[in-house]
Image (cartoon, rainbow, N blue to C red):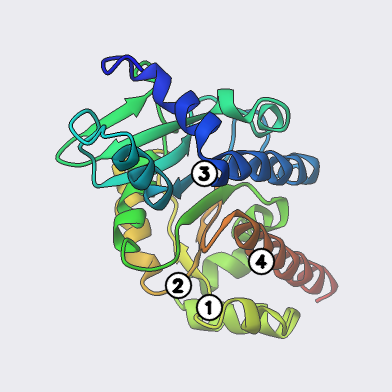
Amino acid sequence: MNDNNSDMLFSDVYNNVLPFRDLILRISKIAKVIHQQGWAEANAGNISIRISNMLIPFIQKNGWENNYPYQDWFLVSKTGSRFRDMIDEPENCLMIIGVGNEEHYFPEDAKPTSEWLCHRKMQEMNKHTNLSCILHTHPTEVIALSNTSFFIDNKKYPKCLNEHFYEALPEIRFFLPQGIAIADYAPPGSSVLAKKSCKSINDKQALIWEKHGLLVIAENIDIALDLTEVINKAAKLCLLKLLKS
């Protein structure tokens, strides 16, 4: 291995760390579901997964600690990447980020999703938990509901809004006992959105970005999709109830 060739790290890990390769393949399958649901139009949506438990042992095994002196490692979607492309070419849509005193990208010329600032802050908040996966998508009914006067009138009272979700889909209490958080609209990818998100989410695993989409935090990519599906179903049922009222 060329110690100075950061482009090689992704392929080295992919070829030699089975859990990492399995994760990439799983992301491919999840990306297909998200795309088929229409929850990631064009290059919408992004993902970050803490993978320190996979990379650090691999780096130590090969004696590469001096070359890669990072305490945390993340698998992150590249800027401009499309979920529909992750289905067949996930490795081309994802990158690795090493985080220590500074960040380093692998490959070096890759750029992370524009929402990486928010992802990184939330990953830091959950550093000592088993919540390692952050998934952001654009579920249609969630966004539609966040554009209604019903949502706007209730967003200052998340507890009240959550009660409407629980009434529409009682099972949501099982998946999200702490409820769902809400962040007022802010420009996508902005530091304002990251700040509002971290302030709003507290101990919750789901956050509705007003007029933008949904962000969930989970133990793995499969549970992240579970939460996304459940929340969007509840939002859809709330919308149907509003139409009948």
**Residue type pointed to by label 1:** Gly
The residue mark sitting in front, 3 or 1, is 3
Pointers 4 and 1 in contact (CB under 8 A)? no
Q: N-terminal of the two: label 4 or label 1? A: 1
Q: Secondary structure at mark 3?
A: strand
Secondary structure state at the residue bearing disc 2: loop
State whether residue 113 is above or below residue 132.
above
Q: Position of residue 240 (x, y in %)?
A: 82, 68
Residue on which disc 2 sits: 204
Give the mark nearest the N terminus, 3 or 1.
3
Question: How far apart in space, not on screen, are marks 4 and 1 (Cα)?
Answer: 10 Å
- In the foreground, 159 or 215: 215
Q: Relative to residue 175, is residue 80 depicted above or below? A: above
Q: In this rendering, which labeled residue sits more in front, label 3 or label 2?
A: 3
Q: Secondary structure at mark 1?
A: loop
Mark 4–mark 3 Cα distance, whole angstroms, equals: 18 Å
Distance, label 3 to label 1, CA atoms, is 21 Å
Residue 65 x/y as whole percent: 22, 36
Position of the C terminus, as image quadrant, is bottom right
* Mark with earlier residue (3, 2): 3
